[in-house]
Amino acid sequence: MRPLAFVDLETTGATAANDRITEIGIVEVDADGTVREWQQLLNPGISIPPFIEQLTGISNAMVANAPPFEAVASEALRRLEGRLFIAHNAKFDYGFLKSEFKRLGITFRASVLCTVKLSRALFPEHKRHNLDSLIERHALYAEARHRALADAQLIHQFWRKIHVDRNILDIEAALQAQNANPSLPAHIDASIVDDLPESPGVYLFCGEDHQPLYISKAKDIRKQVLAHFSPGKKSGKTRHLSSKSSVSTGETTGEIGAALKEATLIKQLLPSHNRQTRNIDAVYNWPFTGPVLLREGNEAHLIDCWRYLGTTKDEAGLYSQAKTGGVKGSFGLAEDPSQFSLACRQTGPITLPAKLPENEIAFSENTSLLFKETAIHRSYDEKRKVLIYLAISRKIIEGAPANSISTVPIQPWGIK
């Protein structure tokens, strides 16, 4: 039997790029059947949101004196290397560990088995395959839930249970189907399969002369790139891409960022296999009075007149203000309207510090050398759990112009 590692993580959130691990649990099973267990709380270096504290029972106080991941990285790597990495929704756990190791300059690769996919393959008559459903369906014993080692133990129980209840040939067929590797062209390094991120973003095929051939957005970069190498792809374009090209990728926070990045790169690089998009502003009028921001995760994408202007993580990106250029504009003498468009939305978990000021200036800027000032005031209504953003532009000549306000009711945000 191949050595196995049943793995579960608890984290501060759902995104490996922004969140961190708070607890790791591993059940090791050697080839001779010997079982060892390891559990470790970790200090994530960032605050654990209240709703995750409630879900997992892991509080900020519990991890305050725990070691950071870098202090246990060698121990974790020793326990995982050479083993089949088995997890429930393995994309989540494997992705977080790869990201944590990558921050330390360590390349972590493993053969991965997802027990969600395995359960679907073996029990297609059932609709639900989350861990709670498996506990009920297979009479698994749960000492706790949403703690790393307890959940890793449950995954191990499920593994043992199916080897009692199901034919070994059915299990082997499901494992082979899940871990089937695509047939890659000889010129493409097989390690590219492990390096492809399972996240939103864009990918680029380049030819032998490094000329861009094809650019595409993807919800899951790995899945979409590997689809180009599947036997069912028969088009001339696909055959050309898969036989004569290299692949590079770029991750984004979400699908909106991926779509915007794709459109920008196609216009910049003019890849030969992409159909050039028609200028949308020649077909549709821009329905807004100025630029707008699309919030996605912890980023904001700025768009004006159907043109993507960029992405920011700065809170200053929450507002847009009409400005007049030239000498008059720089001195604040021009008659620009100084009107704001402000729209704030919760698009992910919001973690507040222990004591947030009732009123503070989140951003300020002198928008001319002499006469104009722009500021965003942030207030917090603790009773109603609402963040309030007020955009103000002061103009000494002719008084204060129109301002804008936006509110964000803080809501719980689900994760894994």
Image: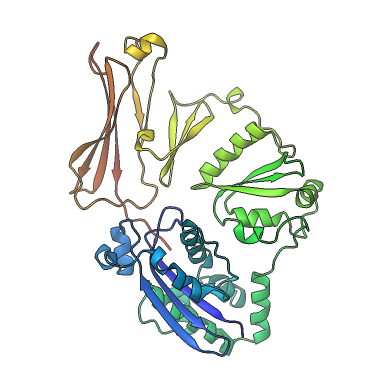
For residue 125, say whether it is visible. no
Which residue appears at 74% of the width and 48% of the height? 245
Which residue appears at 54% of the width and 71% of the height? 116
Dividing the picture into quarters, in which one does residue 36 lie?
bottom left
User: Which of 27 and 302 lies nearest the eye of the viewer?
Assistant: 27
Above or below 334: residue 169? below
Image coordinates of residue 339 in percent, x first then y, are 34, 22
Question: In the rendered view, does 396 fall on the left or right side of 122?
Answer: left
Dividing the picture into quarters, in which one does residue 110 lie?
bottom right
Dividing the image into 4 quarters, which one contains the N terminus? Answer: bottom right
Above or below 249: residue 101? below
User: Which of 42 and 311 lies nearest the eye of the viewer?
Assistant: 42
Color theme of the render: rainbow
Q: How many callouts does the rendering have?
A: 0
Question: In the rendered view, does 389 fall on the left or right side of 224?
Answer: left
Image coordinates of residue 324 in percent, x first then y, are 40, 15
Dividing the image into 4 quarters, which one contains the C terminus? Answer: bottom left
Question: In the rendered view, does 383 fall on the left or right side of 128?
Answer: left
Image coordinates of residue 113 in percent, x first then y, are 58, 72
Above or below 77: residue 106? above
Which residue appears at 30% of the width and 52% of the height? 351
Question: In the rendered view, does 141 fall on the left or right side of 98?
Answer: left
For residue 240, say whether it is visible. yes
Image coordinates of residue 319 in percent, x first then y, are 36, 31
